[in-house]
Amino acid sequence: MSIDRRSGCPINLSLEVFGDRWSLIILRDMIFGGKRHFRELLNGSLERIASNILADRLKRLMELGMLTRADDPTHKQKAIYSLTEMAITLVPILAHLGAWGRVWLPVSEELSIRAELLEKGGPPMWEKFMDELRHEHLGTPSDTPPDATVRATLQAGYEAVVARKAPDAG
Amino acid sequence: MSIDRRSGCPINLSLEVFGDRWSLIILRDMIFGGKRHFRELLNGSLERIASNILADRLKRLMELGMLTRADDPTHKQKAIYSLTEMAITLVPILAHLGAWGRVWLPVSEELSIRAELLEKGGPPMWEKFMDELRHEHLGTPSDTPPDATVRATLQAGYEAVVARKAPDAG
DNA sequence: CAAAACCGATTGCATTTTGCAATCAGTTGC
DNA sequence: GCAACTGATTGCAAAATGCAATCGGTTTTG
């Protein structure tokens, strides 16, 4: 379950951490979707992860130091998963990954608007986003009002595209 | 063999292209190691890829438009694999991946010096490297002398570390 | 206060992918 | 002519994945 260490190459070691089809999807949903609970990740992801794979990856990501798990005080069974600093610093990689995919792959418009905004925001926006994630997951202080967060900005962009594409829904 | 399209999310689509343990290793060896032939990739990689996996991934990467294959005029059996623009634009992602791995994972000193130099060089160095790769793989013009290439710079850094660690070898 | 919905998983099982070693037919160099 | 090398392919065991059903417990609902 832990890391292979086929070689000490940084790219290889990074791939051994998240070089699979699901680990980064889970982290994406936590980072951009704000998901913190098992069921949110299970039912919320577009790619329909299976529950045993999700359980396995959450365990693995915890062992690797990317996530921590805590009991939810409001519900005796609920677990809250938090990103560690190690996972939060993946933001620039996810931004690049999204930008690359947007250029070369058949992305859908509504799902790529976030990547576009994040790319245009550049490193300053990524830094701000990482600070927000540190506040949210690690409890560090922050003075960003809840409606001016990067996540809210990305979400607003997404909703604007959806509204434009289906103007007379409802 | 081709892409799954579990969703149109750019991050997901990117993962479906190289979200496995070997695809990026192969591209890494072509980009940083200058490998162009099957046997070079087979015997050259530190991680000891199996020949069937290598054949499978080369085929897959060609189908996805990341590589092209041409006959080597000097040897009727030899194939030369070339990066496409799609693959060359992975350089910034590989640079970030290496930088992240260097911070968080137990990298070896001699194998991470390249990542360190590439990180310190920043986007200007990445652009220069991509131009060199375009020259090497796509035949576009370039006026960089062969000894001043980014790859040569990275290689020199690697050899300096190796020499320092074993000063009286040979 | 019982039924229903929800909680984070776990189990069983079929399918797919991986990893490894051996091998292939053709080409080249000596 | 023969050994070494070329890009692969084959057979097979082991591991990972995908899917559906289920678990024991908690909370909400009528």
Image (cartoon, coloured by chain):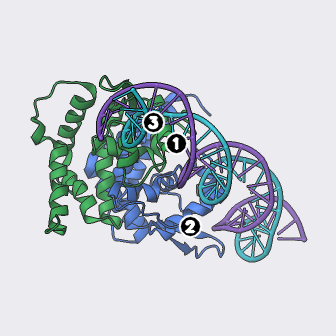
Chain colours: A green, B blue, C cyan, D purple
Amino acid residing under circle 1 = Asn
Amino acid residing under circle 2 = Lys
User: Residue at the spot x=53%, y=65% of the render?
Assistant: B60
Q: Circle 2: is it few (<14), some (14-19), or many (20+) Cα within 10 Å?
A: some
| Total marks placed | 3
**For numbered disc 3, what is the local secondary structure?**
helix
State the CA–CA distance, disc 1 to disc 2: 31 Å
Residue B164 vs B66, above or below: the answer is above
Reading the image, the residue beneath label 1 is A52
Report the front residue among A165 and A90.
A165
Report the front residue among C18 and A124.
C18
Reading the image, the residue beneath label 2 is B59
State the CA–CA distance, disc 2 to disc 3: 32 Å
Report the front residue among C19 and D3.
C19
**For numbered disc 2, what is the local secondary structure?**
helix
**For numbered disc 1, what is the local secondary structure?**
helix
Report x, y in % for residue A83: 33, 33
